[in-house]
Amino acid sequence: MAEQIPAAVTGIGGVVEVEPEEIIAEGGEAAATGGLASQFFHTFVENKLAVAGLFFIVFAVLFCYVGPVFYHTNQTSTQDALLYSTQNSPPSWDHPLGTDYSGFDVLGRLMYGGQVSLGIGFAAAALATVLGVLVGAVSGFFSGWLDSFLMRIVDVLLSVPLLFLLITLAVIFHPSLLILILVIGFTSWLVPARLVRGETLTLRVREFVQAVRVMGGRNSRIVGRHIIPNTVGTIVVNATFQVADAILLLAALGFVGLGVPPPRTDWGSMLANGVQYATDGYWWQIYPAGIAIVLVVVAFNFVGDALRDALEVRLQRR
């Protein structure tokens, strides 16, 4: 139904009829349409690189975990690999990406190593995010001496080069799948802790938090039910970057020989082993693993950037 606007408002005499959708909100802001989920979706899909990154992440997961179901290769027995295949064989019909120095099929090795890299990346990122959120929320909410103590620990650990700390821990503890997850996770919680602490410092003085305190709410309930849920945007965005960082850290450890023990492998270990044969022209042992690391890390960073824009209200189009 058209809305009538008096002449005193229009300044042109008489009454002007306009449709509701033609009315612009005061202050020059266009009226927002759709719910929060709709706005989030539209803001995310506007970033074409993020959509491409998301599709590539899904493809990488399917390639690594579902691919071996259809492409059967031996990736566990070095003796069988040396017995039934040729070492350093170039790409062929039987081996689309050739074979490595042990006779393992590189394409199958890429799937097998991707399972380790992605699995450790997701698990270490989850551990770092959970630990960082808990430390940051507790530190920011209680403040005082506890905040100073926890943040000084964070400052000290941040002052140590991360790769040096990571290599030191990997040398002390014999590398295994679980140890690598714990080592990478316990060296990556510092950044999310500081981010969540900053958000908590602003949330703890908000009216809804003060209302819960007046009603006798326990501190643990305030932190768990009100503080942490209101930092979910920061947590989700940082978690995507944590996955990318964990994959890079694992690749760095694998490159210096501190990756998962054989016959398991990861993309970093594959790249390190392939570099030894770079002067011999065995490019198929270098490029597949290197390209996989770069593309997966870039994809997670693109998705993280889009999530930040979609979850940050101030950056959304109104």
Image (cartoon, rainbow, N blue to C red):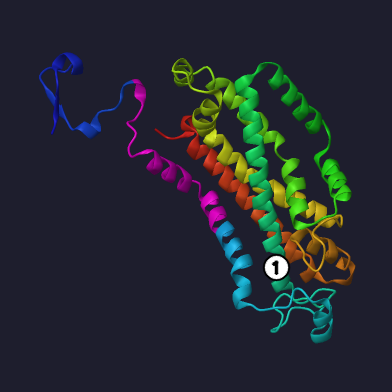
In the displayed orientation, state which residue is furthest to the bottom: 84
SS under mark 1: helix
The residue lying toward the viewer, choosing from 50 and 135, is: 135
Q: Quadrant of residue 192?
A: top right
Q: Quadrant of residue 160?
A: top right
The residue lying toward the viewer, choosing from 61 and 298, is: 61
Q: Position of residue 159 (x, y in %)?
A: 82, 31
- Magenta span includes 18: no
* Rendered view: 203 above or below 129: above
* Amino acid marked by disc 1: Tyr
How many numbered discs, if any? 1
299 left or right of 163? left
Q: Quadrant of residue 238?
A: top right
The residue at which mark 1 appears reads as: 112
- Magenta span includes 41: yes
9 left or right of 229? left
Give the main secondary structure, helix, strand or loop, of the magenta stretch.
Answer: helix
Quarter holding the N terminus is: top left
Q: Residue at the spot x=86%, y=66% of the render?
A: 278
82 left or right of 225? right
* Rendered view: 190 above or below 166: above
* Rendered view: 13 above or below 193: above
Q: Position of residue 225 (x, y in %)?
A: 49, 31
Q: Residue at the spot x=53%, y=43% of the render?
A: 306
- Residue stretch in magenta: 27-55
Q: Position of residue 24 (x, y in %)?
A: 29, 27
Quarter holding the C terminus is: top left
Q: Position of residue 95 (x, y in %)?
A: 72, 80
The residue lying toward the viewer, choosing from 139 and 33, is: 139
Crowdedness of circle 1 by 10 Å Cα count: few (<14), some, many (20+)? many
